[in-house]
Amino acid sequence: MAFEIKAKIANFGGQLLKLEHQSTSTKTKMALNLFLPPTPISHPSDKIPVLIFLSGLTCTGDNCPEKGFLQPHAVKHGIAVVYPDTSPRGAKVEGEDDNWDFGSGAGFYVDATTERWRNNYNMYTYINEELPLELFKQFEVLDSGKVGITGHSMGGHGALTIFLKNPGKYLSVSAFAPISNPINCPWGQKAFSGYFGEENKEKWAEHDATELVKSWEENETLEALIDVGTADNFYKQGQLLPENFKKAAGGKGVQVRYQEGYDHSYFFISSFAGDHVGFHAKYLCN
C-alpha cells in the first residue's frame, strides 16, 4: 500500500522523509525513514542507489538517522538510505511486549512459523520483498538495480542473512556488531525457539549467517565489511560470535575489524558510518 509522508525534514542538504504504510506482510501499519540526498545538478535525471539499514533490538526506524549519522556520508556518495522498523507494532499478539529481546522491537528479520507469531511477524518478507517493491513503485528516483544492505546487532544478522539468502539481489553487504551465529547464542536461541519452534532446527540454520556462508558459491568470494568493538559487552558475553562467521567464511573475502575500546552503541556506529557507506559506494556508485 502507498506510503503516507508524515514529515519532511531537511538534513545534511538532503531530505529525511518519515513514512507510514499498511503492510500486507505484518498486517499492521509500518513506519520507516527514507533519506534522499540532494539531486546532483549535473545529472538531475540519474536514479539514486539505495542502502538499507536494519536496526537492532529495541530500536525503531528513527534511532539510526537520529544517532548513527549515515546521512552525511550518503550525501557525499549520492546514496539514499532506508531505515525500516525492527518488528510489527501493535499486532496484539499475546506476550509481544513482555520482553525487550523478543516480540515488539525484536522481529529478527525472519518469517515466523509458529502459530502465535506467523500471522504478523514476517519481517523477512517485509524487508526483502514488500518494502522495496513499494518504495521503488512510489519513489521512481530510486534505483532498484543498485541496492546494498547493512545493519547493527540484530540488524547486522538481518543484513548478512538476507544478502546470503538472495544471491545477486543486493550488490553489497556490511554489518556493525552483528549477531553472526544466532543458533549458538542466547539471543538467537530465544528468538528462534519462539518464532520457529524449539524442534525446528533446520529452519534455525536457514537464518544463521554462519551456516549460510558455508555454502556460499557466488564466484566463491564474498566481499563483506564487519566492525566489532572490543569493549562491546554483548561481544564479550558471546552474543555476537563474529569469529565463527569469519571462520566459516574461510577465504571468501570477509573483513572483520575489531575496533579497540568501542562499545555496542550508536557512538560506535557513527564513528565508522563513513567507512561503511564508502564500502557500499564502491559497489553501488559504478
Image (cartoon, rainbow, N blue to C red):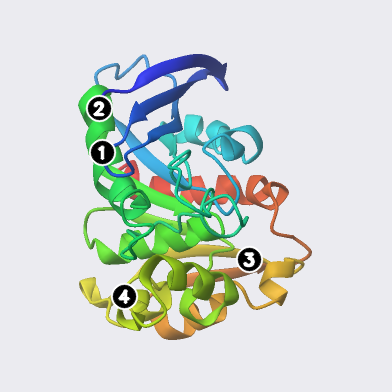
Q: Which residue is mark 2?
A: 1
Image x and y of residue 92, in percent: 45, 43
Image x and y of residue 238, in percent: 64, 78
Q: Can residue 226 be seen?
A: yes
Q: Is residue 250 left or right of residue 182?
A: left
Q: Which residue is mark 4?
A: 203
Which numbered disc, 3 or 2, marks the residue that appears first in the sequence? 2
Q: Which residue is mark 1?
A: 24
Question: 99 above or below 71?
Answer: below
Q: Is residue 215 left or right of residue 189?
A: left
Which numbered disc, 2 or 4, marks the residue that appears first in the sequence? 2
Secondary element under disc 1, as helix, strand or loop, is: loop
Question: 134 above or below 150?
Answer: above
Q: How much space separates mark 2 and mark 1, taking CA atoms?
A: 8 Å
Q: How many marks?
A: 4
Residue type beneath disc 1:
Thr
